[in-house]
Image (cartoon, grey):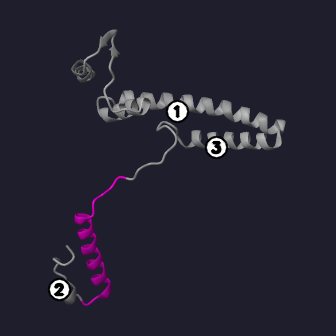
Amino acid sequence: MLCLTDWSFLHDINDIDIMCQKFYSTLNNIFGASVPVKKKHSNRQYPSWFDKNVIKCLRTKDKFFRLYKMHKSVYYLDSYKKYRMVAKRLIDGAYESYINNIQDDLAIDPRKFWEFVYHKKRTTRIPGIMRLNRAELSTTDSIINAFSLIK
């Protein structure tokens, strides 16, 4: 693509700043057209419903646990227990909020729901059996059709 580009328009520009701007603009257009865009793979070790507060609390809890193991101090043990209790509450709250958001957005963005199912089961397949309004759905078509009825 670089060889096929007509660069002669740069000779007609007298201002170096404008010339540089046009050069980079053309170069970025070429890169945008020829370089494939790859999604960044996340090395996230926490579930998607963990927010910054939960992760920070878990790291602090782990820090106090390591300190307790090294020093066998009651202070570190008590701090660890306190942060463990707080972390459990934060995780429960974050999970509940995440589930509520998925339920609220189900009709608008069903992809979030299927991402949640995938992360819970670590599989992309549709579940074998689902229950909806006390009805048991076992075939793929019945499960998919049940979601089309949700309003």
Residue corresponding to mark 3: 59
Q: Nearer the viewer, mark 2 or mark 3?
A: 3
Q: Residues within 10 Å of mark 1 (few under 14, many from 20)?
A: some
Q: Nearer the viewer, mark 3 or mark 1?
A: 3
Residue 101 drawn at (x, y percent): 41, 31
Q: Residue at x 35, y 52 (%)?
A: 39
Q: Residues within 10 Å of mark 3 (few under 14, many from 20)?
A: some
Dot 3 falls on a residue whose secondary structure is helix
Q: Label 2 amino acid?
A: Ser
Residue 135 vertical placement versus 99 (above, below): above
Along the viewing direction, whichever of 131 and 108 lies nearer the viewer: 131
The circle drawn on residue 137 is none
Q: Residue at x 32, y 84 (%)?
A: 17
Along the viewing direction, whichever of 120 and 24 lies nearer the viewer: 120
Residue 23 lies within the magenta run: yes
**Callouts 3 and 1 close, C-beta under 8 Å:** no
Dot 2 falls on a residue whose secondary structure is helix
Residue corresponding to mark 1: 94
Q: Label 3 amino acid?
A: Arg
Residue corresponding to mark 2: 8
Q: Earlier in the sequence, mark 2 or mark 3?
A: 2
Q: Which SS does the magenta portion mostly show? A: helix
Q: Residue at x 29, y 33 (%)?
A: 108
Q: Is residue 56 left or right of residue 147?
A: right
C-alpha span from label 2 to label 3: 57 Å
Q: Which residues are magenta?
A: 14-39
Q: Earlier in the sequence, mark 3 or mark 1?
A: 3
Q: Label 1 amino acid?
A: Ala
